[in-house]
């Protein structure tokens, strides 16, 4: 099961941003959105989404009043361009309060908070889904085409300006999305950031020589100074120690 979401905001660019973020998380399902708060309220009460992203400042019906008129068990994450309403938001039992413009990192923090704040949601939806998902879909080539890539097939992910390249054993796929938006979707147990431009699948490492990481397909990647300590700390957990 997915966590169903609805967006109510009178700014179309905010709706567009949230729609994009939601689409990138496998266990989130957007079931609707509306720039008109009164119509949005009707939809929320009819559909009963698990979560609504709700703007604070809207004409005719503001977010605080909207929140009090929700008749379902829907949880609320407020979205606003102003800090001033945060106290009121949490007094209305909001799960989180996002400031515009909403960054992808802050969005994901809110989602993780939703999961921890609502245990039943977390166990029945997101945590179960996340533990079972072993792949990612990316837009590629022809408009409307989605390519399915198994995590186990990825050797490393390379960042290049505003896009990333998923490098498999004998082929690669480019996705026009920044690396920061890809990282939350990769299993932390397997994928390690070793350079500002490289995220490597630890299962594909053959050996390490100094600052070089050599993969099973002979690819050689540079280990960046910024990530060296955390990388060797991770690797050190599996290094066989000798007795002296």
Image (spheres, rainbow, N blue to C red):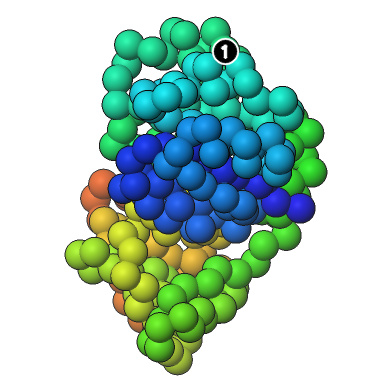
Q: Nearer the viewer, residue 141 or 75?
A: 75
Q: Position of residue 39 (x, y in %)?
A: 54, 39
User: At 33% from the left edge and 40% from the top edge, which residue is drawn?
Assistant: 11
The local secondary structure at tag 1 comes to loop
Is 167 drawn above or below residue 118 in the view shown?
Answer: below
Q: Position of residue 141 (x, y in %)?
A: 38, 87
User: Within the image, what quadrant is residue 139 found in?
Assistant: bottom left
Q: Return the residue found at the far left.
A: 161
Name the residue beneath numbered marker 1: 92
Q: Nearer the viewer, residue 141 or 109?
A: 141
User: At 79% from the left edge and 43% from the top edge, which residue is drawn?
Assistant: 124
Q: Nearer the viewer, residue 195 or 35?
A: 35
Q: Position of residue 12 (x, y in %)?
A: 34, 47
User: At 35% from the left edge and 78% from the top edge, which residue is drawn?
Assistant: 174
User: Within the image, what quadrant is residue 86 found in?
Assistant: top left
User: Within the image, what quadrant is residue 73 found in?
Assistant: top right
Q: Position of residue 244 (x, y in %)?
A: 56, 46
Q: Is residue 56 visible?
A: yes
């Amino acid at each position: 099961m997915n966590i169903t979401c609805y967006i109510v905001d009178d700014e179309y660019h905010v709706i567009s941003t949230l729609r994009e973020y939601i689409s990138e998380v496998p266990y989130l399902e957007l079931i609707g959105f509306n720039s008109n708060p009164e119509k949005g309220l009707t939809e929320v009460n009819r559909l009963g989404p698990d979560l609504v992203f709700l703007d604070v400042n809207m004409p005719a019906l503001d977010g605080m009043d909207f929140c009090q008129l929700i008749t379902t068990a829907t949880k609320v994450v407020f979205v606003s361009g102003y800090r001033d309403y945060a106290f009121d938001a949490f007094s209305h039992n909001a799960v989180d309060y996002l400031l515009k413009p909403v960054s992808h990192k802050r969005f994901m923090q809110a989602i993780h908070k939703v999961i921890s704040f609502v245990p039943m949601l977390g166990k029945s939806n997101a945590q179960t889904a996340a533990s079972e998902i072993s792949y990612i879909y990316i837009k590629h080539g022809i408009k409307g085409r989605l390519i399915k890539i198994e995590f186990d097939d990825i050797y490393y992910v390379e960042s290049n300006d505003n896009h990333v390249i998923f490098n498999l054993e004998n082929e690669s796929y480019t996705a026009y999305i920044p690396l920061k938006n890809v990282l939350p979707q990769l299993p932390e147990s397997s994928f390690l950031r070793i350079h500002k431009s490289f995220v490597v699948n630890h299962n594909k490492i053959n050996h390490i020589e100094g600052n070089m990481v050599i993969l099973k397909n002979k690819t050689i990647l540079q280990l960046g100074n910024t990530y060296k300590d955390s990388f060797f700390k991770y690797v050190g957990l599996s290094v066989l120690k000798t007795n002296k």
